[in-house]
């Protein structure tokens, strides 16, 4: 089986963020040894050494971080002094669906933390310039909710990971224009099947749908954050949005973010705490009708937009 190009496959989810140019704030060297014949530089630790140190590992100099990160046994390195990263894997054929849909996570998390942003395990959608962050553990309904909204014409900032920027006007930033869907979700969202790029996947790997350029008009870089939703699958027909406390939102957001982003700065927990105190939180009680989910969220965000004008 021919090996697919390494960098184009990793770069596809970022195409909606491409700019006209200018100097790079962060640079990343990414390669696999299988196709290039180039191994890791000798000054870097082996993946096994990093794994034994637990995640994340810090060099003694304090400016460089590294993590044993997917695809196993790959290595991710970031040097805050030079704002340069390394993303290495032994073989391009070892890329998983998680890497194809959301590569460079540790580097993005580390680099953006220095700019006051937190990499979150969350989905986000927007309407009328206002975004809702959708938080919860895997299987809680984040992805299905975001995709229901996208296919109903709402803006989509991610189904699994986003960047949060708090301040006078909190914002949520898009990172990946990709969606990860298991077979049952693909059956529910057949409109996305044409955009799945890993058709050679082996179960239980999810399919990865690359959403750019097909949905280019619904993929903003960032939007003002106006609400935090905690989804819950009810089995009822109707979708209902009801007030929720900050504690419930933090309990839905923090554990999965810290677990998935073991390489992230732990100061992000404090930022998540500020988020749920600053932004109104709601329980999103998901009904069974896909279109009603999107309509309920659209109407809610339209009302928020009007109220804040």
Image: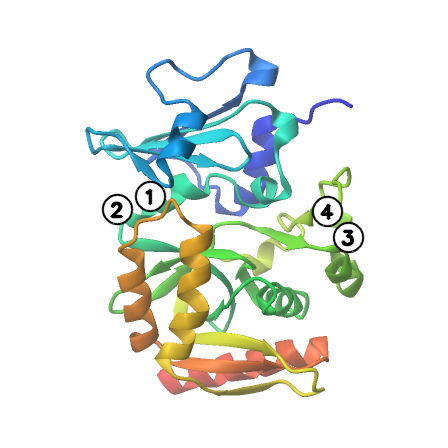
Alpha-carbon distance for marks 4 and 3?
A: 5 Å
Identify whether 178 is placed above or below 185. Answer: above
User: Mark 4 to mark 2: distance in Å?
Assistant: 34 Å
- Between the C-alphas of marks 1 and 3, the distance is 33 Å
Q: Residue at label 1?
A: 110
Residue 64 falls left or right of residue 290? left
- Marked residue nearer the N-terminal end (3 or 2): 2
Residue that badge 2 annotates? 114
Q: Residue at x 64, y 78 (%)?
A: 293
The residue pinned by badge 3 equals 193
Residue 193 position within the rendered picture, expressed as x and y whole percent measured from the top left:
77, 52
> What residue is rendered at 39% in x and 43% in y?
108
- Contact (CB < 8 A) between labels 4 and 3? yes
Pointers 1 and 2 in contact (CB under 8 A)? yes
Q: For mark 2, give the secondary structure.
A: loop
Q: Is residue 149 left or right of residue 80?
A: right
Of tags 1 and 4, which is closer to the observer? 1
Q: CA distance from mark 3 to mark 2?
A: 37 Å
For marks 1 and 3, give the one nearer the viewer.
1
- Is the residue under label 3 in contact with that under label 1 (CB below 8 Å)? no
Q: Are marks 4 and 2 in contact (CB under 8 Å)?
A: no
**Where is the N terminus found, in terms of image quarters?**
top right
Tell me if label 1 and label 4 are in contact, CB under 8 Å. Answer: no
Q: What's the CA distance linking mark 1 and mark 2?
A: 7 Å
Badge 4 is on which residue?
196
Name the quarter where the C terminus is drawn.
bottom left
**What residue sits 39% from the left and 26% below the top?**
49
Pinpoint residue 238: horizontal percent, then vertical percent: 67, 88
Residue 72 pos. (x, y %): 54, 33
């Amino acid at each position: 089986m021919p090996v697919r190009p390494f960098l184009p496959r990793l770069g596809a989810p970022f195409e909606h963020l491409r700019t006209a140019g200018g100097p790079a704030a962060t640079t990343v060297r990414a390669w696999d040894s299988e196709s290039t014949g180039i191994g890791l530089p000798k000054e870097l630790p082996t993946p096994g050494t990093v794994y034994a140190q637990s995640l994340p590992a810090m060099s003694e100099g304090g400016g460089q971080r590294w993590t044993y990160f997917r695809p196993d046994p790959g290595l991710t390195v970031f040097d805050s002094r030079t704002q340069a990263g390394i993303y290495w894997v032994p073989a391009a054929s070892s890329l998983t669906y998680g890497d194809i849909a959301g590569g460079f996570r540790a580097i993005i998390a580390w680099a953006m933390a220095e700019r006051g942003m937190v990499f979150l395990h969350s989905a986000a959608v927007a309407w009328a310039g206002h975004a809702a962050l959708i938080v919860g553990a895997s299987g809680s309904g984040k992805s299905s909710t975001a995709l229901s909204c996208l296919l109903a014409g709402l803006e989509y900032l991610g189904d699994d990971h986003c960047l949060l920027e708090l301040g006078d006007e909190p914002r949520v930033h898009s990172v990946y224009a990709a969606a990860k869907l298991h077979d049952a979700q693909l059956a529910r969202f057949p409109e996305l099947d044409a955009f799945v790029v890993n058709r050679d996947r082996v179960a239980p790997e999810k399919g990865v749908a690359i959403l750019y350029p097909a949905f280019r008009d619904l993929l903003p870089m960032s939007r003002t954050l106006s609400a935090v939703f905690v989804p819950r699958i009810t089995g009822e027909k109707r979708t209902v949005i009801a007030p929720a406390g900050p504690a419930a939102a933090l309990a839905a957001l923090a554990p999965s973010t810290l677990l998935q982003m073991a390489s992230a700065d732990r100061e992000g927990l404090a930022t998540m705490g500020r988020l749920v105190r600053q932004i109104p939180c709601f329980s999103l009680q998901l009904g069974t009708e896909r279109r009603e989910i999107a309509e309920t969220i659209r109407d809610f965000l339209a009302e928020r937009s009007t109220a804040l004008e």
